Image (spheres, helix red, strand yellow):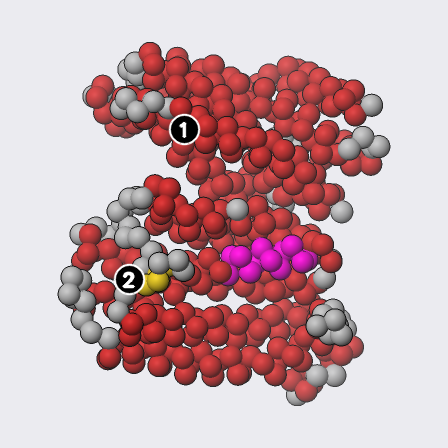
Amino acid sequence: MKNINWFHYAAPQTFYGLAGKTWPWFAGLATALMLAGMWLGFAVAPTDFQQGEGYRIIFVHVPASWMSMVIYLAMAFWSVLGLTFNTRLSGMMTRALAPTGALFAFLSLWTGALWGKPMWGAWWVWDARLTSELILFFLYLGYIALTSAIDDTRRGDRAGALIAIVGAINVPIIYFSVKWWNTLHQGASVSLTKGSSMAEVMLWSMLLMALAFWAYTIALVLYRVRTLILQRESHAAWVHELKEVTS
Amino acid sequence: MNSRAFMAVLRRDLLLAMRRKSEVLTAVFFFVVVAALFPLGIGPELKTLRLVAPGVLWVGALLSSMLALQRLFEADYRDGTLEQMALSPASLPLLISGKLLAHWLVSGVPLVLLAPVLGLQFDLPADALLTLTVALLLGTPILSLVGGIGAALTLGVRGGGVLLSLLVLPLFVPVLVFGAGAVEAQTSGLGAQAHFSILMAMLLPAAFFSPFACAAALRIALE
């Protein structure tokens, strides 16, 4: 561990190459995992005895909610790195993560509404977890709005990093709110201490989908960060020597 | 020296606010007008009004504090005072806390004092009025403290005012939930003690950390 130079890939130039080599692998992995998860979830998993076929949206809903929270934490992580080590790449990573995070938060709300209508009889209820997911969505929008309103990229990165860290305090509240307020939303189906209350095949399918979403996010973020690097480093000589730029 | 610098900033900001009363009064009257508009929209049914009163007054307080927050650093940023503060040997977070305290005294305290009067318009009983006032007394400083971070980040940014609302209003949600919830708990006979404790538990860390976050945000804006 000691001999790895972690800062080697902090330089946009070296990371550009690394990201270019790795993102297709993650994209392929995401496709394979998603196909497997979909097959397990929609073809193999049995019909739920209470909720019928409608429950199957869980295979999209739960991984999307997980991802929306994980991505916010990842943004906070890169923000802390960016503010402490003053690395340019951290700001680009945070910016590359934000749209995907917002997308997953929106997807989670949307699938939640689709699930809520047949199960609870309402598209939307003012339950603690729904509300905090909505707030998380607003936090993503706030981050994107702030960073895109500031023209100076350096200031934009640092200001965004600060608001991401401040907002990250909200993410644990989201997860624990279901215990604090304990309202209509069903309790977590998967917990580390008690094990799972689901059928095994459903659990596997959900985990596969979650991993697929991880791989998808990583692939997309690497791809997006490459574009950001090209944009920001367009004045640098190495960019003009790249095959994809000269051709 | 630090405590003298703190007092100097506090006195200066209060003095400035006294000299420019119209700015302070605008935000306060905004609160009064918003609170008066709701019964017109909802209808004069006293039962309904009693029910929505805590939420309406709290949302009014949030919006009015948004108006006031935009001016927290704006003038000092434009005339260079903030840069001088950042350069001064006194610690910047301390100077900022002086500004935040002055801001709360000028924009938060009037809301706390007005809320019971406006609550009467909504036919709130006496104990609910008292709970509302205490909840606002604990909650409005959090609005100034957390909002200050947003105000510092959006300094001199295009469309700063709207952006500030988008950044800060989601962060105010816990204050709103427990602030308005306190009154509801009181009227339903549960007692508001727990809500007050939670508001206090949010206020204390905010009071400690916010000046540092504001100072960091200001340094980013001043670069």
**Residue A172 vs residue A166: left or right?**
left
For residue B91, above or below residue B167: above
Residue B185: mark in rendering: none
Cα distance between the residues tagged 2 and 1: 33 Å
Residue A225 picture quarter: bottom right
Q: Residue at 36%, 30% (x, y): give it.
A: B181
Kind of residue sitting beneath label 1: His
Q: Nearer the viewer, residue B16 or A170?
A: A170
Q: Nearer the viewer, residue A89 or A156?
A: A89
Q: Which residues are magenta?
A: A71-82
Residue to which mark 2 is pinned: A197
Q: Residue at 26%, 47% (x, y): give it.
A: A184
For residue A26, above or below residue A114: below
Q: Is residue A80 magenta?
A: yes
Q: Is residue B147 magenta?
A: no
Residue B195: mark in rendering: 1
Q: Which chain contains the residue that carries disc 1?
A: B
